[in-house]
Image: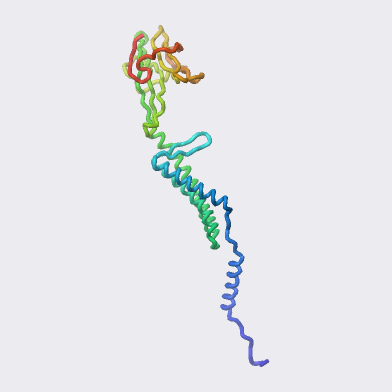
């Protein structure tokens, strides 16, 4: 060996490049793409399609129904669109798992971050839509009273009104069945704005309403198909006079007891 010849040394930058390439090759060889079982992929795709169709139908018809264990909540207007956004976040979360299965690149971290962000955003939009939906429902819910029967006790200076209370949400086609109620107020020709409910007639029709001495007598009969204790009238303790309820046999109903104005005399 020639003592004057020195062995060739690899420059530091070449050593770094070589080690880096080796590390990349090792990482590429060691990386195993994430796999999702076929049943999970099929379930995610099917559920995504169903949710998209359900949500789109809800916002188009302006009646987005959110089912629950104890009933359902119907959203309309902007709360329905916010709930639709929450549903899209859920669909995106389901789709991310399917896309990750077919993506062979080493970027699982991005999918995990996306799933976390979409999940949190979806929950925020979900509760926001519920809160705004309740607020809008109470703002748009309207009620009105229509007098159907009236009788006055001139000696005591009291008037008893039988009236139907109609309540409906923002769409009149979804109106709730009118509720027949009784109130006793100081003698008046029209139903005042503020009064106390004396009786709730529930699932009954009034046959006749009149004064019997110091008492207010109400003859009624159950409506067809009405059964049980809850279907019968309920008298409240706040009434200014005693109320006598008389259950009569099936017969003609007093004119106006189902929604037409009338004021029969006893």
Where's residue 63, x and y in %?
Answer: 41, 38
Residue 218 falls in image quadrant: top left
Where's residue 237, x and y in %?
Answer: 47, 17
Looking at the figure, which quarter contains the N terminus?
bottom right
**Residue found 41% across the figure and 34% down from its top:** 138
User: Image height check: is 96 above or below 205?
Assistant: below
Residue 11 visible within the image: yes
Looking at the figure, which quarter contains the C terminus?
top left
User: Image height check: is 99 above or below 52?
Assistant: below
Where's residue 130, x and y in %?
Answer: 46, 40
Residue at the extreme left: 189
Where's residue 240, x and y in %?
Answer: 42, 14
Residue 202 falls in image quadrant: top left
Residue at the extreme top: 213
User: Image height check: is 193 above or below 12?
Assistant: above
Residue 83 visible within the image: no
User: Image height check: is 100 above or below 132?
Assistant: below
| Number of marks present in the image shown | 0
**Residue found 44% across the figure and 47% down from its top:** 85
């Amino acid at each position: 060996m020639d003592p004057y010849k020195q062995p060739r040394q690899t420059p530091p930058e070449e050593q770094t490049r070589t080690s880096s390439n080796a590390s990349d090759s090792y990482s590429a060889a060691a990386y195993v793409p994430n796999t999702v079982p076929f049943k999970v992929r099929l379930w995610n795709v099917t559920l995504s399609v169903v949710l998209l169709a359900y949500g789109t139908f809800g916002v188009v018809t302006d009646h987005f129904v959110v089912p629950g264990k104890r009933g359902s909540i119907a959203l309309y207007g902007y709360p329905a669109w916010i709930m639709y956004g929450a549903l899209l976040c859920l669909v995106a979360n389901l789709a991310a798992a399917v896309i990750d299965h077919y993506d062979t690149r080493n970027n699982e971290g991005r999918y995990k971050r996306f799933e976390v962000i979409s999940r949190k955003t979806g929950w925020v939009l979900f509760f926001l839509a519920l809160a705004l939906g309740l607020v809008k429902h109470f703002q748009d819910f309207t009620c009105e009273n229509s007098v159907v029967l009236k009788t006055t006790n001139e000696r005591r200076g009291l008037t008893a009104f039988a009236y139907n209370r109609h309540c409906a949400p923002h769409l009149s086609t979804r109106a709730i069945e009118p509720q027949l109620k009784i109130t006793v107020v100081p003698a008046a020709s029209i139903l005042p704005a503020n009064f106390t409910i004396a009786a709730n007639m529930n699932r009954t029709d009034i046959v006749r309403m009149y004064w019997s001495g110091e008492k207010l007598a109400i003859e009624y009969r159950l409506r067809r198909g009405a059964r049980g204790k809850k279907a019968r009238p309920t008298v409240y303790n706040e009434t200014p006079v005693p109320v006598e309820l008389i259950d009569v046999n099936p017969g003609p109903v007093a004119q106006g007891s189902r929604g037409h104005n009338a004021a029969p005399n006893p």
